[in-house]
Image (cartoon, rainbow, N blue to C red):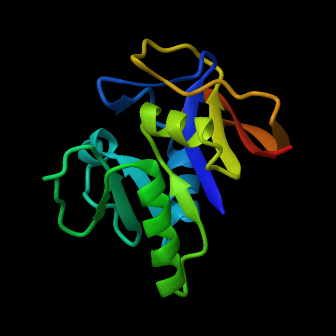
Amino acid sequence: MISIIAVIDKNNALGKDNKLLCHLPNDLKRFKEATLNQVVIMGRKTFESLPVRPLPKRISIVITRDKDFACEGAYVANNTESAVLLAKELLNKNEEAKEIFIMGGGQIYKQFMENNLADRLLLTKVNASFEADTYFPQIDDTWKVKESFTEVDNGFETEFVIYEKA
């Protein structure tokens, strides 16, 4: 299974200046629990924005067009298709890993959705608007809500929604 995991505001904003829009401790806990010991795929800018690189206890794949890019402790792919092939190969070699998570950024999300490479969306929607320079793709009617719940996270009203293909 390939799941896209993201936090967006009510305008589908993802971030600004390669940073998240707000700090959501409950969401970060959910992210950690979901992705621990799993394969995570991200773009180079997202990778470089992480406070710890690579994320501990995850199998990381970084997508970049830079053929010379290398990062200790992470795999590198030059496009989404090769990242998925590599991720599936790594899943087969690791008994704990069962899922592939796409964790950004905006262009990577767009490529996975446009190329029909994701099976599920795990979205935390913040009921607020933020200044942003990166946006999540529109969610069309090929996605149906499977589960959702609302909560307050660090003072923000949020809705956690799981979408699956219709």
**Do we see residue 110 in this rendering?**
yes
Q: Position of residue 92 (x, y in %)?
A: 53, 82
Q: Which of 87 and 149 is in front in this view?
A: 87
Residue 155 makes an appearance in the image:
no
In this picture, residue 138 sits left or right of residue 109: right
Q: Is residue 21 above or below residue 93?
A: above
Please identify the residue farthest to the left as the structure is shown. Answer: 68
Residue 4 appears left or right of 106: right
> Which residue corresponds to the image point at 84% horizontal and 39% vertical from the top-left?
144
Residue that appears at 79% across and 41% down? 149
User: Vertically, is 104 above or below 82?
Assistant: above
How many callouts does the rendering have?
A: 0
The image shows residue 70 at horizontal and vertical percentages of: 16, 59
Residue at x 39% of width, y 49% of height: 79
Coordinates of residue 137 in the picture (x, y in percent)? 59, 27
Q: In the image, residue 151 lies at what x, y percent?
A: 71, 37
Q: In which quarter of the image is the N terminus?
A: bottom right
Q: Does residue 142 appear left or right of residue 56 in this picture?
A: right
**Residue 127 in the figure: left or right of residue 62:** right
- Quarter of image, res 59: bottom left
Q: Residue at the location (47% across, 54% down)?
A: 81
Q: In this view, does 93 lie above or below 43?
A: below
Q: Residue 7's image quarter?
A: top right
Quadrant location, the C terminus: top right
User: In which quarter of the view is residue 160 placed?
Assistant: top right
